[in-house]
Amino acid sequence: MRVAVVGAGVIGCSVAERLQRGGHQVTVYERDTVGAHASGAAAGLLAPFSEDERDAGARSLRLFPGLAQRLLEETGIDVQFHDMDSLTPAFDPEDETVLRRGGGRWLDVFELRRLEPGLHPDCRGAVLFPESQVTPPRLTQALAAAARGRGTEIREHSPVAAPEDVEDADLVVLAAGPWTADLAAAFGLEVPVWPSRGQLVRLRPAPARPAPLNRMLTHGGRYLVPKPDGAVVAGSTEEEVGFDARSTADGIRGLLDFARRMVPALGDATVEEVWAALRPATSDGQPIIARASERIIIATGHNRNGILLAPITAEIVAGLVDGG
């Protein structure tokens, strides 16, 4: 079957690679370049909501080891997938009570100091979860390279504005992130998705010191992610400001304040990069992966979980394409 995939972010590239591997002839249309938007501007924390087999995040995470190995063998690109524990610290008795009830392994203040001496001294303890991470730009580029290697044509700088732009395709997968709503409207469909801006900061800790943080840290919807090259990514904001992908002084200041609050030594870090991207948000926080018409499949609305959910989304779309 000839399939057009609109959007070359991590979702579109994952879908294209999976469909091409399944024997379909795939063409990807991207108005900019591969991974130019949210997929190239993410920290790569892979944190499913639960370990329940019914949870899509947990199912998707289990696909990552095999996917990472296959992509390395086929493309030579190491997506830097690896396990890394995540900490959620408590700063007051209420935090501690809630965290102790929420699963994970509780670390008292003495064990926490031994494992992460760089955390703020006000920490009363923390919950530790076994989690994983990946480097999103590498993952997106590796998926695109693997798809190309199997025969997918990726047309960069090729926007799709109307059905006639993909008239040769038997089936069209709309995976254009927050732009999917306008794109779907051109096909006579309504997709309730809109942009949510996420800002991030890459920090380079001061040299000649021990690493200020050895594990991922999450607190209050924000996170710190140590990367393999020694940098620490602080994220992320979640702002509904329309199609405005600017980095702002207020957004970056909030992330820097958070980083210093969690790990005081990061106050002496170099600000290496700041960036912002638009993610596709939905009213219930759940992605939209569905056949919208006989010819159209929608795959969008992943918001902050696009990297994590890319492998399972590709499997679901493949099922829809093949009649499931």
Image (cartoon, rainbow, N blue to C red):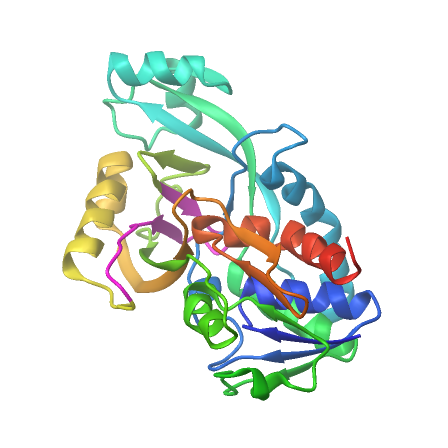
Q: Main secondary structure of the magenta part?
A: loop
Q: Is residue 91 left or right of residue 99?
A: left
Q: Nearer the viewer, residue 241 or 266?
A: 241
Q: Residues in magenta?
A: 223-242
Give yes or no for residue 239 being in the magenta stretch. yes
- Left/right placement of residue 237 relative to residue 177 reads left
Q: Residue at horizontal 15%, vertical 55%?
A: 250
Residue ranking furthest to the right: 23
Residue appearing at x 50%, y 72% in the figure: 188
Q: Is residue 194 above or below residue 9?
A: above
Give residue 253's position: percent from left, percent from top: 17, 52
| Above or below 258: residue 5 | below
Q: List x then y, in percent, for residue 182.
A: 41, 72
**Closer to the camera, 315 or 151?**
315
Asked whether residue 56 is in view, the answer is: yes
Q: Is residue 103 above or below residue 8?
A: above
